[in-house]
């Protein structure tokens, strides 16, 4: 038999299949570990609440008035503030008194009316 024959031996074909199966098995293990680590990171790191239930600043309402320009009503430590937000700056438009109740129809001066 010639050393340069084009017909592969059965041992070479068998070794090739063993190598392919080993490569697939190792790749499966690596992908399984990667998926497990990513799942655990998502489960335990991203679901943590980085803030308490008693937030000091809450966004009560937001309304876009133009592209990249909006008006936002926030509650900062019990005080309601109306701010204008643009890409360049943030302006305080108004401070709303604590006895003013805000609902979807507008403002009223007394709570409960």
Image (tube, rainbow, N blue to C red):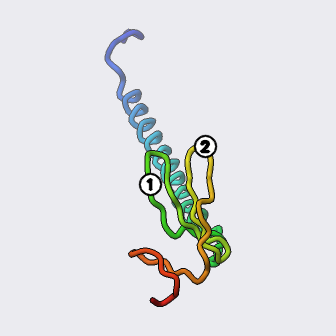
The C terminus sits in image quarter: bottom left
Q: Which mark is residue 39?
A: none
Residue shown at 54% from the left, 61% from the top: 42
Residue shown at 51% from the left, 87% from the top: 111
Q: Which residue lies furthest to the bottom in this view?
A: 112
Residue shown at 43% from the left, 74% from the top: 106
Tell me: residue 67, above or below residue 5. Answer: below
Q: In terms of secondary structure, where does tag 2 sit?
A: loop
37 and 61: which one is in front? 61
Q: Residue furthest front?
A: 109
Distance Cα–Cα, label 1 vs label 2: 16 Å
Identify the residue under disc 2. 88
Tell me: residue 46, above or below residue 56. Answer: above
Can you give x and y, in whole percent of width and height, for residue 19 in the image? 45, 36
Compare marks 1 and 2 and give the one earlier in the sequence.
Answer: 1
61 and 48: which one is in front? 61
78 and 107: which one is in front? 107
Q: In terms of secondary structure, where does tag 1 sit?
A: strand
93 and 25: which one is in front? 93
**How many other residues sit within 10 Å of disc 2, few (<14), some (14-19) or many (≥20)?**
few
Q: Residue furthest left?
A: 7
**How many other residues sit within 10 Å of disc 1, few (<14), some (14-19) or many (≥20)?**
few
Can you give x and y, in whole percent of width and height, for residue 24 in the image? 43, 42
Question: In which image quadrant can residue 77 be found?
Answer: bottom right
Can you give x and y, in whole percent of width and height, for residue 1 in the image? 36, 12
The reply to whether dot 1 and dot 2 touch (C-beta < 8 Å) is no
Q: How many marks?
A: 2
Tell me: residue 49, above or below residue 90. Answer: below
Q: Which mark is residue 64?
A: 1
């Amino acid at each position: 038999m010639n050393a340069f024959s084009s017909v592969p031996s059965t041992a070479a074909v068998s070794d090739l299949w063993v190598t392919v199966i080993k490569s697939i098995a190792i790749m499966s293990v690596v992908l399984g570990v990667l998926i497990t680590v990513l799942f655990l990171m998502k489960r335990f790191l991203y679901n943590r609440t980085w803030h308490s239930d008693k937030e000091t600043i809450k966004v009560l309402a937001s309304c876009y008035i133009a592209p990249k320009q909006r008006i936002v009503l926030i509650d900062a430590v019990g005080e309601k503030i109306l701010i204008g937000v643009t890409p360049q700056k943030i302006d305080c438009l108004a401070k709303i008194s604590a006895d003013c109740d805000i609902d979807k129809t507008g403002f009223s001066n007394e709570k409960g009316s």
